[in-house]
Image (tube, helix red, strand yellow):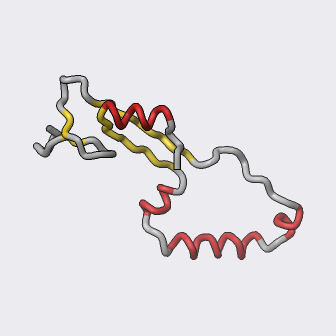
Amino acid sequence: MTENGSPLLCDRCGTRLTPGKGNFYVVRILAVADPTSPVISKEELAADVRAEIERLIEQMAKMSEQQLMDQVYRRLLLYLCVPCYQRWIDHPVRK
């Protein structure tokens, strides 16, 4: 059971998971946008930087705080039954 009393289910197949029985894995995923400095060309440096900043601010004003954060940082917590975990860990980026 989860903290709110609902059953704990596998996030992949929906199988009921039982804490203390050893029948599931907790997978923590942390995704962070490219932390390196941007590559800026001479042409970009010569452009009107103020206009570009204003364009970006205007674009960001139309987005929610969550949408903006999701572009930079994302943390997920998955509960996977043993069979789903085995399939996922063997091929985590399979399409």
Left/right placement of residue 32 relative to residue 7 reads right
Query: Which of these two is toward me, 49 or 92?
Result: 92
- Kindly identify the residue that appears in the image at 54 percent across and 70 percent down: 60
Q: Nearer the viewer, residue 5 or 59?
A: 5
Residue 73 spot, x, y in % from top left: 50, 49
> What residue is at 40 percent from the left and 44 percent from the top?
76
Number of marks in the image? 0
Image x and y of residue 8, in percent: 20, 40
Query: Foreground: 40 or 46?
Result: 40
* 70 displayed left or right of 84: right
User: Where's residue 91, x and y in %?
Assistant: 51, 37
Q: Residue at x 25, y 28 (%)?
A: 23
Give the residue drawn at x 18%, y 23%: 20
> Extreme right residue here?
42
Where 8 falls versus 66 (above or below)?
A: above
Q: Is residue 41 above or below residue 58?
A: above
Left or right position of 59 against 5:
right
Q: In this rendered view, identify the residue nearer to me: 73 or 49.
A: 73
Q: Dividing the image into 4 quarters, which one contains the N terminus?
A: top left
